[in-house]
Amino acid sequence: MSTLRSVDETAALIAALPNPGRVVVGIVGPPGAGKSTVAGQLVELLNGAGTSPRAALLPMDGFHLPQSRLVELGRRDRMGAPDTFDVDGFTAVLASLRPAAATAAAPGFGSPNVGNSGVTVLAPGFDREIEEPVPAAIVITPEFPIVVVEGNYLLLGDGGWERVAPLLDATFFVSVDRDIRLARLIARHERFGKSPSDARAWALGPDERNAVLVGASAHAATHTIALG
């Protein structure tokens, strides 16, 4: 596992990955690590100033189960845990980025996940204001040769998540100081309506349990992004 020290260095590595037709990479890390920010910056760098965008962003957040379904399952109080996502839908979208023959027997990173499916792929987005998925909010056309996927559980080894990593060419684990991560989480929860006490309780409760789980999967990443 190599360690990268900047987003620019990471973008250069992704741009050089040898996968004809389409490169699909994963940005992974615990809640509050800055995955979304890093992934967005990577897409911006990879697209550069050209008139034809090269990279598309696919966040895992759109695959949150709807609030009503979480209530039915008794999981609303731990929204964000691995079993509160539609992992089947997520893996189906990832597989649809490649030709069917390429994903049928994919045993590991990069091979035989070669090529571009040549079809437009739709994926859900996520509205943080109401904490609900938004169907077909993301459109990935065949013109995008790079797809940057970001989420917490791309490296988990069970619960259906074990099907994700073999569909990726490389994975990058975002490493950040725990105090910085917690401060970000608390600020985010407050920004989206939680009181300071509730924001801290959620960050130290459900978020921290998920962070421990995600951290245990870090060894499976092909690269680490250490941003301080």
Image (spheres, rainbow, N blue to C red):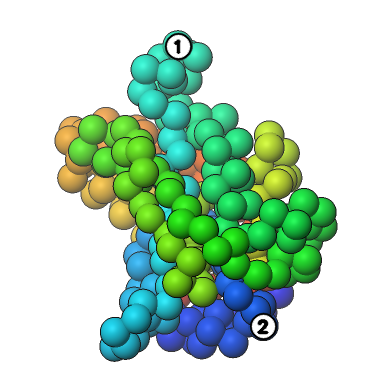
Q: Is residue 48 left or right of residue 168?
A: left
Instruction: Kindly state the secondary structure of the residue where label 1 is placed.
Output: helix
Compared across the picture, whether 32 is left or right of 51 comes to right
* Position above or below: 116 against 97: below
| Residue that mark 2 sits on | 18
Q: Residue 78: where, in percent of width, then height?
A: 45, 27
Identified by mark 1, the residue type is Glu
Q: Quadrant of the C terminus?
A: bottom left
**Residue 8: percent from left, percent from top:** 43, 85
Which labelled disc corresponds to residue 72?
Answer: 1
Query: Which residue appears at 78% of the width and 61% of the height?
Result: 108
Front: mark 1 or 2: 2
Do tag 1 and tag 2 residues touch (Cβ < 8 Å)? no
Q: Is residue 78 above or below residue 207?
A: above
Q: Earlier in the sequence, mark 1 or mark 2?
A: 2
Q: Secondary structure at mark 2?
A: loop
Left or right: 199 in relation to 167:
left
- Quadrant, the N terminus: bottom right
